[in-house]
Amino acid sequence: MRFPGTLSARIIIGFAVLIVTFGGISLSAVLTTDQLNSTIRAIRVGYLELAMNSRDLNQKQQGLFSYLDELAEESSPRRMMLRLRRLREPRRNFLDAIDGNLTDLSAIPSVRARDIARVRADAEAIRRLVDRTEPLYQQLLDDPPFEKRAGGPTGANAPSAPPRPTGETRLPDSRPSAVDDTPLERLKRLESQISGMTHRFETRQRTDVRGTARGLERGAEKMRFLTILWGAIALVVGVLMAIWATVNLRPLRRLRDAAREIARGDYGQRIDERGPREVADLAREFNTMGSAIQERERELVRTERLAAVGKMAAMITHEVRNPLSSIGLNTELLEEELGELAAGQGEKAAEARTLCRSIQAELDRLTAITEEYLYFARLPKPKLQEEALGPIVKSIVDFERESMAARGIALEVELAADLPPAMVDESQLRQALLNLLRNASEAVAEVGSGGVRVYTRRGAQPRTAEVVVEDDGPGIVEELAAKIFDPFFSTKDGGTGLGLALTHQIVRDHGGSIRVDSRPGHGAAFIVALPIAGAAS
């Protein structure tokens, strides 16, 4: 998978994944819990009450139907009236309660409207039959059947059945008899239908309650399973996010370890510049800091070495200059004496004078070396002024052009016309550039042919100007490139190793920098970067 490069974006994505996961889990848990609560509410408010009311309705109905069978044995009309009222009124009340239960169920979202409509249709059918019994009960109350038995005509006044002829067989009459068509008998038939319906109604509601309870049990099992599943998913996602965060933060541990190594003095410690964008930027800045610290450490060591060498050079030069002066003076006097004694001893005198000249030449060389050491030891701080680099570079090139031409070295110069003035000490800068030109000419002389190019340009760093001295010499190997600015380090026979060290010190005192760009066999280029006017600190 490819993720955004920034560490902050990856962290946000990780937290977003966790939030979405736990949000989905919470939402699913809430929905499942609401469904279970709705089912529980349906059982508590609707189905259970509906089953209880249907049971009570069925019990009252069966009691009413049984009483109708015993009605003929009732002792008084008033007692019959009271018992019928006590049996009929609860039936109406239970039917009304069932309607209220159905209304409550309609307000619960989990209850299907089709089930409510079915129960309501059954209840309405029972109510319609109950309504049909009302006129029959009124007739029954108006003309109780046991009153005829107690006060009606009996004996001779009672109507007798017509005589049946002897030997006549009577066929069954399909028409209802007068006894079967009485209000009581019609009531019994209606109440029998109502009893069957209330019994089926009660059975159906009891079955619905059991089915709903089983559904609730299945919902609880599903909830338990989903809870375990959600917990496992949350655990897996959390572990994956922890591993992912650890992998993304691993470069920070590399930074920490590298920082510890630098703190121990290993300034060459570097780390890979890869990973999230912030980590890569931090690694890049860390490597830059390590390079800067390494360069500062190198500069500090070089500065301390220069200071120590300067003191030693000053002491040695001071001790050597006076004896050299005395030796030189005595050599000149000896040469003059040999000139006066030349008569008669011309060949030996000439040889002696030659030896004196050789001694004088070596003395002059030693004097020049001691002067160079003394200048190096007493290098003053530069007095910076705004100076145009073009005229300074041109004058140095013109000064060296003839001597380089005499050795067959081509010298090219290219000066930028729009280069702003720089803050320099002209005399010290001339000395530094002169050292670079002479080193370049000596490098070209080693290979026998080639040229030297000097040009100015705007610096790669902001508000700097650069002077570049480039040669076609043998170049500098990478192992020596870091040492060429150290005092007394030289690759030339007879070199003092102070030229580049002095140049480096001068450029550094100007607030600039000097670096070398070289490939062995392809020459070398020394780049001097100086701050332009207004940029020097």
Image (cartoon, rainbow, N blue to C red):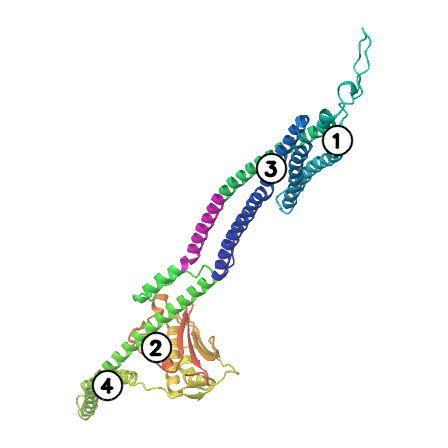
The circle drawn on residue 51 is: 3
Callout 2 crowding tier (Cα within 10 Å): few <14, some 14–19, many ≥20: many
What is the x, y in percent for residue 27? 54, 51
The circle drawn on residue 500 is: 2
Residue nearest the observer in this picture, 12 or 142: 142
Magenta highlight: main SS: helix
Q: Is residue 83 magenta?
A: no
- Earlier in the chain: of badge 3 and badge 2, it is 3
Which numbered disc, 2 or 1, marks the residue closer to the eye? 1
- Earlier in the chain: of badge 2 and badge 1, it is 1
Q: Are marks 2 and 4 in contact (CB under 8 Å)?
A: no
The circle drawn on residue 143 is: 1
User: What is the residue that sits farthest to the front in this orientation?
Assistant: 156
C-alpha distance separating marks 2 and 1: 144 Å
Tell me if I can see residue 520 in this picture.
no
Left or right relative to 141: residue 271: left
The boundaries of the magenta stretch are 227-251
Residue that appears at 43% across and 85% down: 423
Going by the numbered disc 3, the residue's amino acid type is Ala
- Earlier in the chain: of badge 1 and badge 3, it is 3
Say which quarter of the image contains residue 469.
bottom left
The circle drawn on residue 245 is: none
Left or right relative to 82: residue 412: left
Going by the numbered disc 4, the residue's amino acid type is Gln
Which numbered disc, 3 or 2, marks the residue closer to the eye? 3
- Earlier in the chain: of badge 4 and badge 3, it is 3
The circle drawn on residue 360 is: 4
